Image: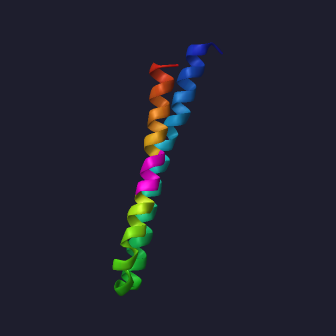
Amino acid sequence: MDAEAAKLFGAGLAAIGLGLAALGVGNVFGQFLSAALRNPSAADSQQGRLFIGFAAAELLGLLAFVIAMILLFVA
C-alpha cells in the first residue's frame, strides 16, 4: 500500500467518528427525553447534564473531523 492510499484510508476511518458522534447526540437527547417524560419535575435540574453530554459527543465528532482533514490535506 502506498502512502497516498494509506492517507485516504486513515482519513476514511477517522470520518467514521462523525457518524458515531451523531449517534451519540441522538442517544443523549433520546435518553433525556425519556427520563423527562417519566419524571417531568426533575427535567429542569438535569438540563445542565444534557448540555454537557451533548457538548462531549459533539466535541468527539469535531475532533474526528479535524483529524480526517489533517490526514487529507496536511500529512
Q: Is 30 rendered above or below residue 1?
A: below
Q: Is residue 5 left or right of residue 36?
A: right
Residue at 53% x, 35% y: name it: 14
- Please tell me which residue lies in front, 63 or 37: 63
Task: Specify the farthest residue to the right.
Answer: 1
Q: Is residue 5 left or right of residue 32?
A: right
Residue range of the region highlighted in magenta in the rendering: 55-60
Residue at 46% x, 54% y: name it: 56
Q: Is residue 68 magenta?
A: no
Q: Is 7 rendered above or below residue 31?
A: above
Q: Please name the colour scheme applied to the rendered image.
A: rainbow
Question: In terms of secondary structure, what is the magenta stretch mainly?
Answer: helix
Quadrant, the N terminus:
top right
Residue at 47% x, 40% y: name it: 63
Residue 71 point in image, percent of width and height: 51, 25
Q: Is 29 rendered above or below residue 22?
A: below
Residue 47 point in image, percent of width and height: 36, 71
Residue 8 point in image, percent of width and height: 53, 23
Residue at 46% x, 53% y: name it: 57
Residue 28 point in image, percent of width and height: 44, 63
- Please tell me which residue lies in front, 5 or 48: 48
Task: Specify the farthest residue to the top.
Answer: 2
Q: Is residue 42 left or right of residue 67?
A: left
